[in-house]
Image (cartoon, helix red, strand yellow):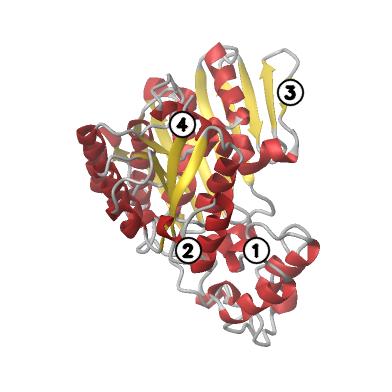
Amino acid sequence: MSTITVAIAGLGSRGQDAYGAALARMPRRAKVTAVADPNPERVQAAAQLFGLSPEQCFSTAEDMLAQPRLADAVLICTQDRQHVPQATLALRQGYHVLLEKPISPDLEQCKALLAVSRETGRKVAVCHVLRYAPFYRKVKEVLDSGVLGRLITVMGIENVGYWHQAHSFVRGNWRRSDETSPMFLAKCCHDMDLMVWLTGKTCLRLSSFGSLAHFRRENAPAGAAQRCLDGCQAKANCPYDAEKIYITNEKTGVAHGHTGWPCDILSMHPTEASIRQAIQTGPYGRCVYFCDNDVVDHQVVNLEMEDGLTISFTMSAFTAGGGRYTNFMGTQGDMIADMAKNTVTVTPFGGKPTVYDFNLSKERMSGHAGGDSVLLTEFLDYIEGKDCPGITSLEASLESHFIAIAAEESRRQGGACLDMAQFR
């Protein structure tokens, strides 16, 4: 088995911390030969991790992709609206591509990338990492076994979590749909991909409702300051206070030893001093009621699938914890997939429940319930020409994007019911 060479465009929490770290653990299988990122500190860290020379390091993906081909494959982990232009350059240079989701908020761009992939004969996989998690592969196994009978209804929720919403979708990179993507596409194209893959059904019609209800200027409490550390008089009772989230919170704060995500987005080497400096001066210290965000903080989508299957799916910022919870309801039994508990519970009607427990070691469950490392392994298999029936190819991923983009269109039209065949 020959070593596959890989280039990485974008050295953030996905490109470097998730995929880069995983590649570093498989030196016999893959070797990183080039990286690109506008942050010199991140480029330097990657160069040290992978043993790269200055000639193998670039400040932009475009500069890296303008060179004669530097690797067999490239991981594109940049911002949403950069994905298709950069992937197109990569395909025309002869790279296979592993593309961070979403492909693009623009349907025509998604279709154009598929055309380039077919034209060049290069392979593209999209990072719908949850498909690769042992947790969801068990869900798929149960559904395919027929033990639930005919699947009639699915009810799911994405618990975004109050602090995750504040971090990513109010203060952070995904706060504005005109700069990145609508929130349902950015956050829930994972979930829509799961619904299509797990059920094996295509969406016929959908409608959606949602809004930016809370994180608005008019909802600021009395005495709120523009920045959390600028003498805010509402600080004591504000759960979104940046000092709480990044420093003092037991589950996320650097003072309690949490130096990974989200703190490492504020500082590459988080300490209490570096995080405090970041929230004093940077975007993550802004009051959540005085940011320039415009994406929704809650949304519900109703799907009519083939064969009469109906799906209701909710995304909400207003939860104490994160994780996905889904109830699959069939004619012979139901199944509850609870990622917060890492359990899948299958209950035949009139029978005893069977519980599959995925509370594995921290290392095996890291990275989307273990999906990150499996995704990379199967992507390498895929570009080697091995049979990978579960791979999230570009073609497979498009359906989740059709649904998520249609959901945003329906929401903007006040919940209009959209015919998906027409929309596609």
Amino acid marked by disc 3: Val
> Residue at label 2?
173
Mark earlier in primary sequence (4, 3): 3
CB contact under 8 Å: marks 1 and 2: no
Q: Quadrant of residue 281?
A: bottom right
For the point 40% across and 64% down, the residue is 59
* Along the line of sight, the residue nearer the viewer: 194 or 301: 194
> Residue at label 3?
355
Q: Quadrant of the C terminus?
A: top left
* Residue 147 placement, left or right of 259: left
Mark earlier in primary sequence (2, 3): 2
Q: Residue furthest bottom?
A: 231
> Residue at label 4?
380
Badge nearest the viewer, 2 or 3: 2
Return the x and y of residue 170 as percentages of the image width and height.
Answer: 52, 66
Mark 4 to mark 3 CA distance (whole Å)? 33 Å
Badge nearest the viewer, 1 or 3: 1
Give the number of marks: 4
For the point 49% across and 29% down, the residue is 378
Mark 4 to mark 1 CA distance (whole Å)? 31 Å
Mark 1 to mark 2 CA distance (whole Å)? 14 Å
Return the x and y of residue 393 as percentages of the image width and height.
Answer: 38, 32
Q: Label 1 neighbourhood size at 10 Å, few (<14), some (14-19), many (20+)?
A: many
Amino acid marked by disc 4: Leu
Mark 1 falls on what kind of element?
helix
Decide: is 305 above or below 292: above
Disc on res. 263: 1
Mark earlier in primary sequence (4, 2): 2
